[in-house]
Amino acid sequence: MAVLDRVRTDRPTKGRGVVLGASGLGLLLAAVATVVWSGSFVTSRALHDSVPPVQAAFWRWVVAILAVAPFAARPAWRRRHLIRRHLGFVTLASLLGVTVYNTLVNQAGLTTPAGTMGMVMAASPVLMALYERLGGARPGPRRLTGMLIACAGVLLLVGKGSLAADLAAGDLWIVAAAVCFASYSALLRRRPAELGGAVFLFATFVLGALMLLPAYGVSLAVQGGFAPTAGTVGPLVYVGVFSSALAFFAWNKAIALIGAARAGVVYYLQPVCVALLSWLLIDESMGPSHLLCMALILGGVALGTARSR
């Protein structure tokens, strides 16, 4: 994490015959986060009948804090005066990206299939682009065209071949999660640079988990706890270490390098990844129409993320 924090954005990074500039690194990190997050939708669906949503969210962030602490706890303590100075910003980011977003995803997983969750979450890039447009940014014609093609593929996928998507009542939870995630991503562009990526991540994880504590206590009192078995602990470790610590760091760094709107085009890959994983791991159905829509999404992402010379 510390190495990625120090990557410069004004010159390319050279490897063995490969030149990876800031733009390429940003796209790569956005893709890594998107693929890893796809697995979290599958785990949310897999845990829907064994771990209450709030408890799953709380333990996810406890695991994430433990995973990030060796890299960030000491730097965060040294910069605690900076965290206090920017406490309002850090608290809002924690609320949107940690406390609320993932709890809504877990709540949606009670009734909504993993594939549908991934498809609805693909609405986030549209909101990210809207936020950047309100901030004065203007997407180029190639990015706009790619976004529209990918968005059409998502709508066809949700609507089962029709552009008229039919959302069930339970799907509104994941719609709210998409709004939270897009707002969090747009907010990242204003992250104070002096906090550093790892320190900011650790602070948001800790604050987000603390804000979840009251709801966690209510859930324990009303719903009771869950049995710590391999089928419950294993998925929680995955979402804590990979979907939280690794993916959030990669996504935050990608936003810093290429902006929310351009990273959001890569995020359109999520419904493709979720559909494939849910088909492979939890036996959700996938037919020819899914493959056609995936081709549209992949083509739109390739067009929208390409840089004109």
Image (spheres, rainbow, N blue to C red):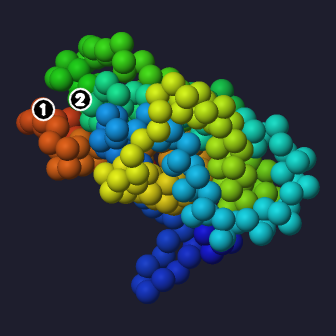
Tell me where residue 20 appears, x and y as whole percent: 50, 71
Q: Is 191 displayed left or right of 218 in the figure?
A: right
Q: Is 163 displayed left or right of 82 in the figure?
A: left
Q: Name the quarter where the N terminus is drawn.
A: bottom right
Q: CA distance from mark 2 to mark 1?
A: 7 Å
Residue 31 seen: no
Residue 71 seen: yes
Tell me where residue 264 appears, x and y as whole percent: 48, 42
Check residue 242 in the rendering and tell me which mark sits there, or answer none: none
Q: Is 250 displayed left or right of 202 in the figure?
A: left
Disc 2 designates what residue?
Answer: 157
As drawn, 161 above or below 34: above
Q: Secondary structure at mark 1?
A: helix
Tell me where residue 103 appears, x and y as whole percent: 51, 33
The residue that appears at 91% across and 55% down in the rendered structure is 81
The residue that appears at 39% across and 46% down in the rendered structure is 227
Q: Residue flagged by tag 2: what amino acid is it?
A: Leu
Disc 1 designates what residue?
Answer: 289
Crowdedness near tag 2: few (<14), some (14–19) or many (≥20) residues, C-alpha within 10 Å: many
| Observer-nearest of 49 and 173 | 49
